[in-house]
């Protein structure tokens, strides 16, 4: 009976929130269609016109991951309507929320800093609609000072996080590289299994009391 109680409690605890370790995106990569760090896959995109998504290479250096573009400094820029996606699918089977997002701004960052949205599929063609996503581009948290700025937690949840620069060319503000992220993953069915585990533990405790 003691083993049954322990197993039930362990099941309830194991099915709760599982915190992902902080992931750093700094390194050396001159350009690739995607960059993987600790199981998270980062890809680059840009738009032409109102909605016309195109894939582009990403690059990685001591600042983090940016978009491989015509610019000498490979960062995410609003002038070129550049974006990054973080795919959490390889590290989690369920819901993902972002606890903190770390961006490296080579210039003097100013509010509203960046834009983001949770999407269910990678950008392609006219999807997602920038018009439809506009109201979801917000500035979460209170940033610090200096080039390395941490934001969080980010509202929403999903598999893909889309982030982009709101304004500015390389000569102005709010261009950035993706430096790091911490996130929480709750596997599918976790709530049900946790309740089952708690129920097993409760039944075990009740049976034990009756014997006493």
Image: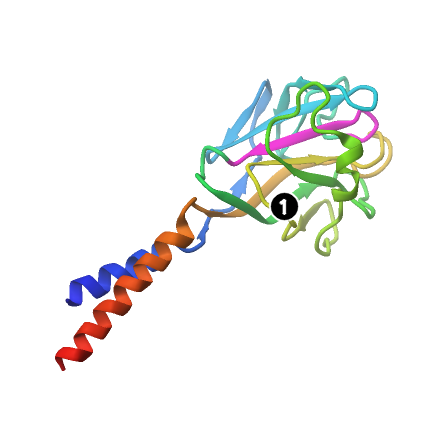
Residue annotated with mark 1: 101
Q: Residue at x 54, y 40 (%)?
A: 24
Toward the bottom, the furthest residue is: 212
Quarter of the picture containing the N terminus is bottom left
Quarter of the image for residue 115 reads top right
User: In the image, residue 79 lies at what x, y percent?
Assistant: 84, 27
Q: In this view, does 186 lie above or below 133?
A: below
Question: Residue placed at 67% from the left, 18% from the top?
Answer: 56
Placement of 119 over or under 98, stated as above or below: above
- The answer to which of 60 and 123 lies nearer the viewer is 123
Q: What stretch is highlighted in magenta?
A: 77-88
Q: Could you tell whether 96 is left or right of 196 in the image?
A: right
Which quadrant of the view contains residue 32? top right
The structure residue drawn at horizontal position 51% and vertical position 46%, both measured from the top left corner, is 22
Residue 85 on the magenta segment: yes
In the depicted structure, whether residue 91 falls above or below residue 203: above
| Quarter of the figure with residue 162 | top right
Question: Position of 1 compared to 59: left or right?
Answer: left
Q: Is mark 1 on a helix, strand or loop?
A: strand
Q: Nearer the viewer, residue 37 or 14?
A: 14
Crowd class of label 1 (few under 14; some 14 to 19; many from 20; radius 10 Å):
many
Q: Which residue is drawn at 67% across and 50% down?
A: 151
Which x, y percent locates residue 212?
14, 82
Q: Does the magenta stretch include residue 174?
A: no
Front residue of this view, candidates 25 and 183: 183
Horizontal side of 23 relative to 126 (left or right) equals: left
Tell me residue 11's x, y (percent): 30, 56
The spot of residue 37 in percent (x, y) is: 50, 33
């Amino acid at each position: 009976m003691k083993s049954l109680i322990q197993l039930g409690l362990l099941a309830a605890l194991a099915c709760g929130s599982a915190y992902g370790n902080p992931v750093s995106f700094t390194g050396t990569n001159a350009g690739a269609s995607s960059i993987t760090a600790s199981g998270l896959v980062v890809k680059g995109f840009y738009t032409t016109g109102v909605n016309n998504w195109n894939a582009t290479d990403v690059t990685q250096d001591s600042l983090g991951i940016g978009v491989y573009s015509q610019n000498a400094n490979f960062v995410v820029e609003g002038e070129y309507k550049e974006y990054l996606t973080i795919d959490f699918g390889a590290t989690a089977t369920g819901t993902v929320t972002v606890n903190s997002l770390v961006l490296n701004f080579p210039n003097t960052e100013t509010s509203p800093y960046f834009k983001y949205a949770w999407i269910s599929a990678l950008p392609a063609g006219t999807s997602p609609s920038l018009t439809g996503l506009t109201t979801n581009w917000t500035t979460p948290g209170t940033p610090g000072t200096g080039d390395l700025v941490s934001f969080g937690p980010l509202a929403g949840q999903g598999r893909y996080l889309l982030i982009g620069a709101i304004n500015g060319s390389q000569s102005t503000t709010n261009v950035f590289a993706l430096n790091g992220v911490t996130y929480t993953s709750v596997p599918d069915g976790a709530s049900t299994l946790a309740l089952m585990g708690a129920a097993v533990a409760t039944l075990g405790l009740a049976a034990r009391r009756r014997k006493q």
